[in-house]
Image (tube, grey):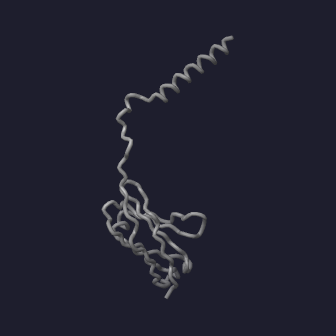
Amino acid sequence: MRVMIFKRSVQTVACGALLVVLAGCPKHENFPTALEVVAAPAPSTFEVIANGINTSGLYEYDLTWSISDATNVDRYRLYLVGAGLAPELVHETTDQETAALALPIALPFNAEGLQFGLSTVSTGAVESAIKPATIPPIP
């Protein structure tokens, strides 16, 4: 009998709480329903330049890009594209790299034909579309 009364009390409290949730809380009546989205444009150009093999035997490449309006750009993201089901994040730029609009890389293998993609991330944490570029042959 006591278990039955306890079950009914718990059910009654749960139903009351559900009604309060469905009715809404009056403190949050003026909660903003539309947030301002700060977006940055995708990179205008993105290219990979093959520089050759350095003295350590590494293959050197320069990644360079431009953007039409960098006002809201917080950072750039570099992806390896086409190696799997989805693009794989390889690198996220630091403050110095973001300002430079270029990123030198050295790989232990010839990456000819691999495809990288670059996107922007705005100050509002919105990511742009990925701009792809294919790695050219070593000169």
Query: Image point 62% across, 17% down: which residue?
Result: 8
Query: Image point 52% across, 84% down: which residue?
Result: 137
Q: Quadrant of residue 26?
A: top left
Say left or right for 12 vs 72: right
**Is the residue 94 above or below the residue 14 in the image?**
below
Q: Quadrant of residue 99?
A: bottom left
**Is the residue 71 above or below the residue 53 in the image?**
above
Q: Quadrant of residue 125?
A: bottom left
* Image quarter in which the N terminus is found: top right
Query: Image point 37% across, 52% down: which residue?
Result: 37
Q: Residue furthest right?
A: 1
Nearest the eye: 90 or 69: 69
Residue 43: x and y, percent? 40, 69
Residue 115: x and y, percent? 53, 74
Q: Residue furthest top?
A: 1
Query: How many numbered discs, if any?
Result: 0
Residue 64: x and y, percent? 40, 75
Residue 49: x and y, percent? 45, 81
**Is the residue 22 above or below the residue 133 in the image?**
above
Say left or right for 21 vs 38: right
Nearest the eye: 125 or 21: 21
Query: Image point 37% across, 29% down: which residue?
Result: 27
